[in-house]
Amino acid sequence: MIGKIATGKSFRGCINYLHEGRLQSSKQQQMLEAEKKQVQVIAYNQCFGDKKQLIKQFNEVRQINLKLNKPVFHATLSFAHKDTNKLSNQDKADIVDELAKSFKFENNQYVAIAHSDTKHEHLHIVANRIGYDGKTASDSNSYKRMAEFCRQMEKQYQLT
């Protein structure tokens, strides 16, 4: 399993990308790109709805702490080719819950989305680093923490 983390400024940009893919030059190409993504929502936490509703909800909570420049936490978990179809959706949701605990945003808004647009299964987790209490989830040492998390999940779920 390979994990990647990014922090960003725009919930709209991130959530639109997860639902529709990269921005295309025509509406027809954009529809093909979105169809190719094969989006499946695996888990919601403290939020719910379609992409517009999610963006609105994330941005409302963002208003609690306007000083934070990068409130978007975006993690990608990519599974090895030989682990394809090894995990159920519940297993994936459980892994996402463990990730939220590891990165201390289990009480914040997050959504997990599975994509089938590449040869390997992968999940995207978008979380609001700002909690309802106004506290911010740290992104310190995130690469090291992600590597440790991936090794732990590989052992727990017998993944490659």
Image (tube, rainbow, N blue to C red):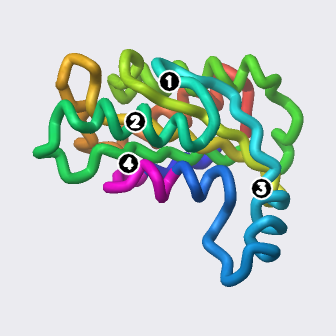
Q: Is residue 16 left or right of residue 138?
A: right
Residue 90 picture location, percent across and down: 74, 17
**Residue indicated by mark 2:** 58
Q: Residue furthest left?
A: 67
Q: Label 4: few (<14), some or many (≥20) within 10 Å?
A: some
Disc 3 to disc 1, C-alpha distance: 22 Å
Q: Amino acid at mark 2?
A: Phe
Q: Amino acid at mark 3?
A: Lys
Q: Amino acid at mark 4?
A: Tyr
Query: In the rendered structure, which disc, 3 or 2, sits on the residue that comes first in sequence?
Result: 3
Q: CA distance from mark 3 to mark 2?
A: 22 Å
Label 3 to label 4: alpha-carbon separation: 26 Å
Residue 143: mark: 4
Residue 71: horizontal and vertical position, in percent? Answer: 29, 44
Q: Hey, what amino acid is under mark 1?
A: Cys
Q: Is residue 98 left or right of residue 71?
A: right
Question: Which sits earlier in the primary sequence, circle 4 or circle 1?
Answer: 1
Closer to the eye: label 4 or 1: 1
